[in-house]
Image (spheres, rainbow, N blue to C red):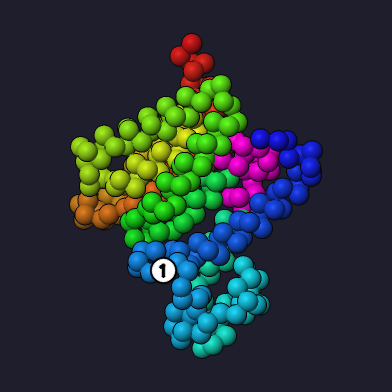
Amino acid sequence: MPDLLTIAPLWYWVVMAALLGLALGSFFTVMAWRWPREESLSTPRSHCTGCGHVLGPHELVPVLSWAIQRGRCRGCGARVSARYPAIELATAALAAIPVATFGPTASGLAAALMAVALVPIVVIDLQHRLIPDVIVLPAAAVALALVIAADPGRWWQPVVAAAGAAGFLFLLWLFYPGGMGLGDVKLALLMGAVLGTAVIPALGIAFLTGSLLGVAMLLRHGSAARKMAVPFGPFLAVGALVALWWGPAMVGWYADRLG
């Protein structure tokens, strides 16, 4: 992959990533509503789910349209949830920050791809306990190709990490299918492809934070908490984002202690 910093400065690529993230975030808001309901992602045009008012171009500008309209539909005046601009802003940030950190390189793009993909995964999993294959599997394939392109001589490392992370969660799913779903297994595939060995602390953080929430629920609700289903995808996302920046240092620290 050519050095894009010779074409334009880093700030340019960060801004481009943020703008692309805003556009993707706008699409993710539609996807989060339609995909779980098995509706088409392309038709009908974006509209108010209350009155059916079809949104015009000036009503589709990410974040700004919501702010200018004060969070209300122009057709019926109904309140539009703040989650829409929140998703758009989160996607923009998670597209731009990895590029700012790792540069407009193959590995930087892979990191941004994973971070951006986590947005609809978390939103949909929290609401419906589903992780969309249409997001996670293509993201895993493209991210793996980018990471291999970044270091072709070590092509086997992301492959082993992806297969190992997915295989580990698959075994857990086989023994305890009620604890997680196959969507979590596929998400681990994406995480391993991008994070490499840092997927180990990522999974550790996911299980730790999930366990802490479980303890808190037991303390608050007692035995009734055992019947409360909590999606695991958001915990995997937290682990992935922490490990994206601090995972290699965590692996190095642990390796030093073993040595």
Residue 1 spot, x, y in % from top left = 66, 35
Q: In this view, does 162 lie above or below 83?
A: above
Q: Is residue 252 above or below residue 220?
A: above
Q: Mark 1 points at which residue?
A: 40
Residue 193 spot, x, y in % from top left = 47, 35
To which quarter of the image does residue 106 belong? top right
**Res 246 visible:** no
Q: In this view, does 169 lie to the left or right of 59?
A: left
Circle 1 SS class: loop
Give the extent of the magenta segment. Answer: 93-110
Amino acid under disc 1: Ser
Identify which residue, 60 or 124, lies in the foreground.
60
Residue 114 spot, x, y in % from top left = 52, 45
Identify which residue, 38 or 129, lies in the foreground.
38
In the rendered structure, does residue 129 fall within the stretch colored magenta?
A: no
Residue 141 spot, x, y in % from top left = 47, 41
Q: Is residue 4 above or below residue 254?
A: below
In the rendered structure, does residue 104 fall within the stretch colored magenta?
A: yes
Residue sitting at the far bottom: 76
Looking at the image, which residue is at 42% across and 46% down? 137
